[in-house]
Image (tube, grey):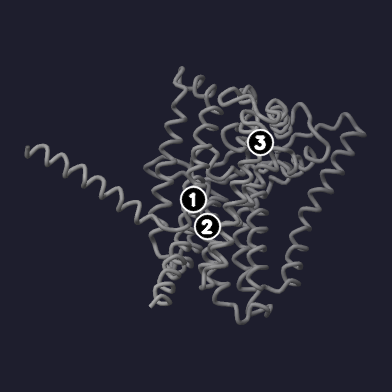
Amino acid sequence: MDATKEIRFSGLKNTFNTNNLINKTKGDKVIWALVVLLTLVSLLAVYSATGSLAYKNYKGNTEIYLFKQIAFILVGIMVIYFAHLVNYTFYSRVAQIAFGISLILLFYTLFFGVKVNEGSRWIRLPLINMTMQTSDFARLALFMYLARLLSKKQNVIKDFKKGFVPVITPVLLTCILIAPANLSTALLLGASCLLLLFIGRVSTKHILMTIGIALIPIIFLISAAVIRHGKVKNDDTVVVTKGSSSTLFGRVDTWIGRMESFIYGSKETDNDAYQVNQAKIAIANGGVFGVGPGNSTTRDYLPQAYNDFIYAIIIEEYGLLGGAFIMFIYLVFLYRCIRIFKRCPFAFGAFLALGLSFTLAIQAVANMAVTVNLFPVTGVTLPLVSMGGTSFIFTCLAIGIILSVARNVEQIEGKTATEFAK
């Protein structure tokens, strides 16, 4: 009898702990639902995209990458949960320190980081023996710092020296340090920041001036691609080796090659164009309704099918309807974040939630645009869907911070409603 009572008490205790955990989970419930939905899509897509690779590398163990992804998702959900419990004002207090550390890490990565494909983007973390792309941490730190600056500079934000220069300087520093190894990430980050500055009431003429300056290297790359393609077309003896330069600022040849591939199409020796062509084949195979979960054939030929080009596998298996549904999820996520921005009574929280949502939404759009050949190959992942890594964890941290702002808004609105009822 005592044992029965003990079992019942234990069951009630576990139920209480579960309910307590659920009760502590606050913030925008729709965003929570979208996170769960995207992680479920990630499990299906990553398992399908890595099946053949796992069979080859792990002697028939096709579930190895699935288990790794499950582990990353569990850690990511924990990061979101604990980050959303922290009062978002804490992120304002640590913003300056985090931004300073990010600049040091970016500088270290530029000269001493792990080099992959002629680009130094990663540092190796001690003990756990994992690589971290420092631009992911820098992006998060930059938006925390930028939100802090915008909230404090609203009275002088239209002034060039007192308002614009202080807020644009950290953006330029971060993008300049990221650009040599990862130009596409630097451009996307810069675009997200300028969009936030525009909403933060920065003078439009100052923003347009910045865009004009940023367009100069882009125009140079396009012009160089056109000129080089013309030389190759007129002289068949010219041999182009894309990405041959490996000096610190020597990825210019790679950037020009990507522009050339995007404008003029593929060559058999062009790896970027090969990936885009395989993505097109996947989309054509998928049609409207797709070939079904796990039935992708392009995954065996498409490099980075589980990472940069996972959207192509999703379309092949779930069709254009499945691809449109993924786009719809990101649009709903952005809408809910804009809703948080409108409801938040404090400038820092509003700018923080909006800035982080912009960068995630723009990253998602860029990834999908590359897959359907509307944008040159960038190497950015699909947030919460591509195979896990430190980028996945930082994405979860960003979402946790957004939910922290939403939780605070709910608490303020709850107190206001209670006082109004009295």
Q: Which residue is mark 2?
A: 140
The kind of secondary structure element at disc 3 is helix
Pick out the residue farthest to the bottom: 155
Q: Which residue is mark 1?
A: 394
Image vertical order of residue 390 relative to residue 211, above or below: above
Contact flag, marks 2 and 1 (Cβ < 8 Å): yes
- Indicate the quadrant containing the C terminus: top left, top right, bottom left or bottom right: bottom left
Q: Would you call the spot at circle 2 few (<14 residues within 10 Å), some (14-19), or many (20 or more)?
A: many
Q: For numbered disc 1, what is the local secondary structure?
A: helix
Q: Is residue 177 above or below residue 420?
A: above
Q: Earlier in the sequence, mark 3 or mark 2?
A: 2
Mark earlier in primary sequence (2, 1):
2
Near-viewer residue (340 or 102): 340
Q: Residue at x 15, y 39 (%)?
A: 7
Q: Residue at x 81, y 48 (%)?
A: 222
What is the quadrant of the N terminus in the image? top left
Q: Amino acid at mark 2?
A: Leu
The amino acid sitting under disc 3 is Leu
